Image (cartoon, rainbow, N blue to C red):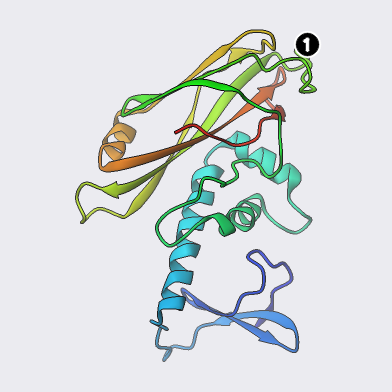
Amino acid sequence: MAQLKKHILGEVTGGLGDVVFKKIKGENYIASRPTDYTMDMKSEAVLRRARFRIAMKLAQSMNKSLRLKAIWKSKAPEGLSAFNFMMQRNYPYVQAETIANGIKLTPDVGFGVGVTAVNLTSTGLTVDISAIGTNAGIITASEPNIGMTAVLFLSNPADPLNPAYDYLTLQSGNLSTNLNSALSFEAVLSNQETQLFNLYQDQKAFFVLATLDASGAVVHYSSTVLAV
């Protein structure tokens, strides 16, 4: 039995998959589930497992973006991976089969974004924004490019045999960083992504913007924006 040093989701007791969380004398421990264990099917335990799964899938989707992964890694507490930090921050915003509008694609507050138009279809996401302005701390000479990363939450499947929800991770092409003009970002869905998109009747789109240096590394990023 191993001691759990970092509390990813706060204090945890009970089981998840093949492991069991225990609290002994104020300390959290993790152990293998006994082979004769019978899964707890009480409603509270079922909901807890469902919340964990939807938070994990959200983190997996965010982790697919090298930009988001780099941002979270740079802010993660010592000993906590970017992935686990994503789960920790977003767990309060998920339910069994849905996510709240307050989920975080970045771990803290970034520069503000004024959205003027959004168009989400089965072929892609387009977001128009007003000028960012010069008070965001961005230096265009050392941050020559800017791009959008988006996560789509798909729910309410047309066919009830399909999973209750899924995610898509999208990234736009880069634009030249211009703080004084409106900008338009477009992330195009692949053929496979379009097919997945069309399986669901409801979609939520969240996005962040990130400025990039000459090597493509993230310098500044925006707060998370619910596009639609």
Residue 220 vertical placement versus 169 (above, below): above
Specify the amino acid type for callout 1: Ala
Q: Identify the residue shown where x is 32% and y is 55%.
A: 164
Q: Position of residue 32 (x, y in %)?
A: 54, 81
Q: Position of residue 90 (x, y in %)?
A: 58, 53
128 or 163: nearer the viewer: 128
Task: Give the quadrant of the N terminus.
Answer: bottom right
Q: Which residue is mark 1?
A: 141
Side of 57 relative to 162 (left or right): right
- Residue 41, percent across and down? 38, 81
Identify whether 123 is placed above or below 224: above
> 51 or 114: nearer the eye?
114
On screen, 48 above or below 72? below
Check the picture and name the quadrant holding the C terminus.
top left
Quarter of image, res 154: top left
Q: Nearer the viewer, residue 32 or 190?
A: 190
Q: In this image, 220 relative to 20: left or right?
A: right
